[in-house]
Image (spheres, rainbow, N blue to C red):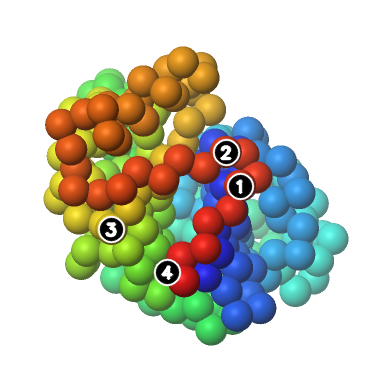
Amino acid sequence: MRITKFGHACVRLEHDGATVVVDPGAFTDPAALVGADAVLITHEHVDHFDEARLREALAADPALRVWANASVAAHLDGVAQRVTVVGEGDAFEVGGIGVSVHGEWHAVIHPEIPLVKNVGFLFDGRLFHPGDALTVPPHPVDTLLLPIAGPWTKVAELIDYVREAAPRQAVPVHDAVLSPVGLAVHTRLVGPGGPGTGAELRALAEGESLDLG
């Protein structure tokens, strides 16, 4: 299984000939979608879900399918037959990759800002993308895609989250809101320069891949 980091919260997963793209939003290079078999969307915010771009990809490839929560699916009228609505507790398969769904809500940005629905995706029981939430997977995973920064995050909470999730390694995502200096500060504190999480922090550059074995 190989993951490649694209813009912001987007990753491309390749395994046994199947290609799955998670959260190709407005800060993601459209090339992330080329050749994909499936697109999974955690929630409706534009940095995770670019409706126009996704519609273009669906028009270009009749075989492309989408899995998302009901809030995202509601935006995709006209292509609903190619969209599967999923929520907490659901499971499905894409090209031999088993996917289970965990979580329900986006993290709180501010009590006066309405919450939106958010789901996380667990791939083959070993790679977890929580979207914009600190959802703890149902068991310790090999690799956690860690939302390293956003208007709802706090470094102290990220450290505690990684400790609770107990992955072997954490890969930072959701980083477009940070300057290079800010990213270095956050990864240092959540990684080797902080109090420790019990997990190795594996930061990927844009377009860089990581083989998970």
Badge 2 crowding class, 10 Å Cα cut-off, few under 14, some 14 to 19, many 20 or more, is few
SS at badge 4: strand
Return the x and y of residue 213 as percentages of the image width and height. 46, 71
Badge 1 crowding class, 10 Å Cα cut-off, few under 14, some 14 to 19, many 20 or more, is few
Q: CA distance from mark 2 to mark 4?
A: 22 Å
SS at badge 2: loop
Tag 3 residue: 168
Q: Is residue 152 above or below residue 137?
A: above
Q: Residue furthest right?
A: 60
Q: Residue at x 45, y 40 (%)?
A: 203
Tag 1 residue: 208
Image mark for residue 128: none
Mark 4 vs mark 1: which is more N-terminal?
A: 4
Tag 2 residue: 205
Badge 3 crowding class, 10 Å Cα cut-off, few under 14, some 14 to 19, many 20 or more, is some
Q: Residue at x 20, y 55 (%)?
A: 166
> Residue 210 vs residue 18: left or right?
left
Using the rendered view, name the quadrant where residue 122 is placed. bottom left
Q: CA distance from mark 3 to mark 1?
A: 19 Å
